[in-house]
Image: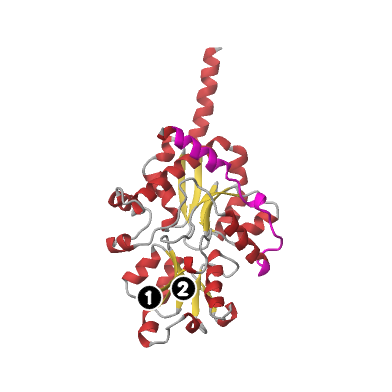
Amino acid sequence: MKFLIFVLYLIITSNLIAETIKIGSSPVISSAGIYLAKERNYFKEQGLEVEIIDFNSSGAQMTVLLSKGELDVGAGNLSSGLFNAIAKGQNFKLVADKGHLEKGKDYIALIVRTDHLTSGKYKTLKDLKGFKIGMTSLDGVSQQIVAEKFLNKVGLNASDVEYVKLSYSEMNVALKTKSIDATIQIEPYLTKALVDGIAKNVANAAEVHPNQQSAALFYSPKFMEKNPVQAKKFMIAYLKGVRDYNKAFIDGIDKDKAISDLKKYIKIENDKIWINMMPVGLSNDGSIDTISLMDDVKWYFSKKYLEKLPTLEQIVDLHYAKEASIELFKVKK
């Protein structure tokens, strides 16, 4: 009997370890929690094998793969595509913070081509009229909301500019080649554009949308239903990575080591960029700003990017983050 129990234990344990968790993530600074958890073996500590799949453009692409069960975890910008899928019955859940705006953590900003400032073509937000502005999606994404708030602040509307769909890295190339005039850029590409001299930061996103929940970690229905134990373990590892990021970039503890680790995933070699990079808001406990989140969801609906308005309960499930935080608190004690 004892032998049978032991064999069953080995089978269950081996299944937990053998199944690789596939994560979709953009190589940007708000993904630091994932990258540090991977590099520092926090996932392995939890008995998990993970594979990170890079998405260089909008997080909306992840939605299809999540719905097919080809991705277990998504980590990206919040977009109408995700919320539409939820409203239509796809049981995705936002389970943790993966990037929010707050004072001093201005990792998203409006940047304008340097030559426009030098020539005087751009002096104030009113001068955005007629500009081509880079955007990761034209069908409803968190940066679109920020852009509209900047425009509305000076009496302009989205119709007064032209949005151009580009990935984050493509935006900097487009600024350099002068095929766009401005963009809502994210770190590390924000600071890279400044260091390279191709653009200037003219306004931080937090000025017009403080506390915006711009990105999140989301679990696929398959992952939550079939692998609840792994889902909890994944969150423990992820939050350890988030806390390491905050210790390094907010508290200044072992920052050089964190930069060295992150360089393996975010291909920015210039140390000047890393040193001057604005930090991202990442909650140590994974909490999500649900008020800001629902304000943005209502914006998508008002712009007809959503066919149906999902409820907060349909969108968010923070029990994984809460349980992981309790577990990490026990370990700390």
Start and end of the magenta stretch? 302-330
Q: What mark, if any, has residue 183 been given in the picture? A: 2
Residue 188 on image: x %, y % = 38, 62
Q: As drawn, is 188 to the left or to the right of 209? A: left
Question: Which of the pair 3/317 is nearer the observer?
Answer: 317
The reply to whether callout 1 and callout 2 are in contact (CB within 8 Å) is: yes
Q: Is residue 9 visible?
A: yes
Q: Is residue 327 above or below residue 173?
A: above
* Magenta-drawn stretch contains 237: no
| Element type at mark 1 | strand
Quadrant that contains the N terminus: top right
Local packing at callout 1 (Cα closer than 10 Å; few below 14, some 14-19, many 20+) is: many
Residue 284 on image: x %, y % = 45, 47
Q: As drawn, is 153 to the left or to the right of 307? A: left
Q: How many marks?
A: 2
* Magenta-drawn stretch contains 328: yes
| Element type at mark 2 | strand
Q: What mark, if any, has residue 199 been given in the picture? A: 1
Residue 305 on image: x %, y % = 65, 66
User: Disc 1 marks which amino acid?
Assistant: Ala
Q: Residue at x 50, y 28 (%)?
A: 13
Residue 243 on image: x %, y % = 41, 46
Q: Is residue 141 above or below residue 46?
A: below
Q: Earlier in the sequence, mark 1 or mark 2?
A: 2
Q: Is residue 304 visible?
A: no
